[in-house]
């Protein structure tokens, strides 16, 4: 099995970014249209000011990469970037020979970005006006009806409904 197939079979967040080619005088300028990095927007657990945004980022990204990514691709002005690495947690799993093995989950890297020039970001409330709320209400009504039937026919629960 060639190495390239192994490389591309890994998920994107576990892949290493290939190194930039060496620049020699006279070579054409290296152009990268979309980087291989990724950033995932996170909703903070506590309320934060509207000019702060949290991201989970690619493990190889630096502060400068995060700032350039947001400024060049999304045209968002950035004042400050703070980066934090959370160590992976210990995982216990059983291998093919039923031996208990231990391993570490992959480290996670987070970026805390402060936006500039009066730019703000509020995390959208997706579930506020969702059609799923109607479905959830119908499910609740159905559960209440079945609960009331169980109370009404408590002495005949073992008999099928069409005989009650």
Image (cartoon, grey):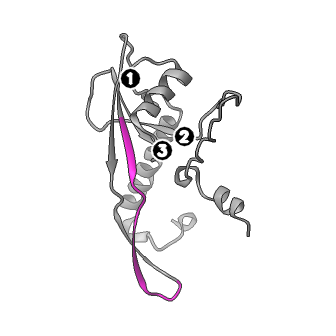
Return the x and y of residue 74 as percentages of the image width and height. Answer: 53, 22
Residue 127 visible somewhere in the drawing = no
Q: Is 109 within the magenta? A: yes
Task: Confirm or deny contact between disc 2 and disc 3 (CB under 8 A).
Answer: yes
Mark 3 or 1, nearer chain start: 3
Secondary structure under tag 2 reads: loop
Q: Residue at x 64, y 31 (%)?
A: 32
Would you identify the image quadrant in which residue 22 lies?
top right
Highlighted range, magenta: 96-111
Gap between marks 2 and 1 measured at Cα = 24 Å
Mark 2 or 3, nearer chain start: 2
Q: Tag 1: Cα neighbours inside 10 Å, few (<14), some, or many (≥20)?
A: few
Tag 1 residue: 122
Tag 2 residue: 37
Return the x and y of residue 10 as percentages of the image width and height. Answer: 60, 58
Seen in the picture, residue 44 relative to 74 is either above or below; the reply is: below
Q: Residue at x 43, y 87 (%)?
A: 99
Return the x and y of residue 28 as percentages of the image width and height. Answer: 71, 28
Q: Is 48 within the magenta? A: no
Mark 2 or 1, nearer chain start: 2
Would you identify the image quadrant in which residue 1 lies?
bottom right
Task: Confirm or deny contact between disc 2 and disc 1 (CB under 8 A).
Answer: no
Gap between marks 3 and 1 measured at Cα = 23 Å
Residue 119 visible somewhere in the drawing = yes
Secondary structure under tag 3 reads: loop
Q: Residue at x 70, y 31 (%)?
A: 27
Tag 3 residue: 58
Residue closest to the eye, 9 or 136: 9
Q: Tag 2: Cα neighbours inside 10 Å, few (<14), some, or many (≥20)?
A: some
Q: Is residue 104 left or right of residue 30?
A: left
């Amino acid at each position: 099995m060639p190495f390239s197939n192994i490389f591309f079979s890994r998920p994107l967040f576990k892949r290493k970014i290939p190194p930039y080619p060496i620049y020699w005088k006279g070579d054409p300028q290296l152009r990268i249209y979309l980087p291989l990095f990724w950033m995932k927007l996170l909703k903070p657990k506590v309320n934060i000011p509207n000019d702060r945004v949290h991201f989970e980022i690619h493990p190889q990204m630096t502060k400068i990469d995060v700032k350039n990514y947001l400024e060049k691709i999304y045209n968002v002005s950035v004042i400050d970037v703070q980066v934090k690495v959370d160590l992976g947690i210990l995982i216990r799993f059983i291998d093919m020979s039923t031996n208990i093995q231990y391993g570490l989950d992959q480290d996670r890297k987070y970026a805390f970005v402060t936006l500039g020039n009066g730019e703000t970001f509020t995390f959208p409330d997706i579930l506020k006006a969702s059609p799923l709320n109607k479905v959830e209400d119908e499910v609740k009504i159905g559960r209440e009806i079945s609960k009331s039937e169980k109370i009404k026919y408590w002495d005949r629960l073992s008999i099928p409904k069409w005989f009650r």
